[in-house]
Amino acid sequence: MMGHIDDPCAHCEEMMQPYLDHILNEEEKLEAEAHLSECDWCRRRYRFEESLRVYVRQVVTEPMPAELKLKLAALRLPLE
Amino acid sequence: MAEAPPDAARLASDARDRVHFEEEALGLSDQVYRVARHLAGSREEADDLVQETYARAFRSWRSYQPGTNLRAWLLRILTNLNIDRGRKAQRTPPMQGLEANDYFLYDRLSESDGGISDEDRVVERLSQDDIVSALSSVPHDFRDVIVLVDIGDFSYQDAAQILDIPIGTVMSRLHRGRRILKRELAESVLEEGE
Ligand SMILES: [Zn+2]
């Protein structure tokens, strides 16, 4: 905490991924939130990261080809 | 001593267990494919990989412990097969210059638009093709973790087990991998702007 006293935004950036992954401890989480509540610059960037994650998940998801599903079912072992 | 005659009741219950296993595994195939699609380099490879995974899973169903995470068990088979398919030959990427800071992409996207007010819309400047191709250019070690955690919704713990790496490595690869992905995305946007 002390090492970043000069640049709270840099510290906030370091906490972004762990914050969004919910792995900060309570103290760090409050620290990040306190900074975000007063810093529009960082808040925008957190918000962007959050929507980017959701967006990436959405757009890369491709439906499984129907033929593949049939091929998988055909791989089942015959009943003895 | 002669072998005991097959116990019909036991055989029947065995068959039931197997059918149950197969059905449960097939029920997860959409989720398995979703992850496989981006662990593999192409749709064709993903297709093959998923088939090999299910063929192996159906053969070795007895080694699955009922009640444990079947999706993770299937993905463990799949990632091992993927590695066997020649992933080892992959170069280690030069990390210098690959990573930017976490805000690099946002800064690029918003500056090219003269300042955007709605952060939720900034991402829409990225096309599906941009994202799929950026993801495929993230080096395997990092991509595997991103795909499992951010796309496949696996916990760090599951990802660590699937990839057989420590949980701390999952976390550090995830953090670096996301930065690499954002760097790749920023580059694709810059290229389009030219
Ligand atoms: Zn700030």
Image (tube, rainbow, N blue to C red):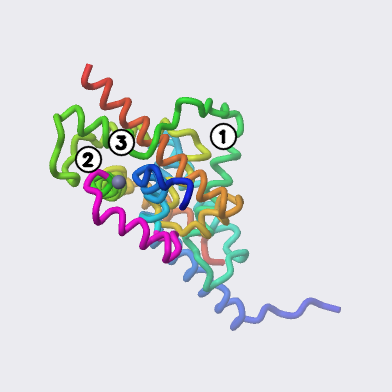
Q: Amino acid at mark 1?
A: Arg
Q: Is the C-beta of the residue carrying label 3 under 8 Å from the nearest atom of ligand 1? A: no
B111 or A63, nearer to the observer? B111
> In the image, residue A3 lies at what x, y percent?
48, 46
Q: Amino acid at mark 2?
A: Val
Q: CA distance from mark 2 to mark 3?
A: 10 Å
- Look at the image and tell me in which quarter the N terminus of chain B lies: bottom right
Q: Are marks 2 and 3 on the same chain?
A: yes
Chain holding disc 1: B
- Residue at the extreme top of the image, as rendered: B194
Q: Is residue B67 left or right of residue A38?
A: right
Q: Which mark is residue B9?
A: none
The CA span between labels 3 and 1 is 22 Å
Q: Looking at the picture, how far across and down is residue B59, in whole percent?
A: 58, 57
Secondary structure found at label 3: helix
Q: Which residue is mark 2?
A: B123
Q: State whether residue B187 appears in this view.
A: yes
| Crowd band around label 2 with a 10 angstrom C-alpha radius: few (<14), some (14–19), many (20+) | many
- Location of mark 1 (residue): B87
The answer to which of marks 2 and 3 sits earlier in the sequence is 2
Quadrant including the C terminus of chain B: top left
Using residue A9 as the reference point, say whether residue B98 is left or right of it.
Answer: right
Residue identifier under label 3? B131
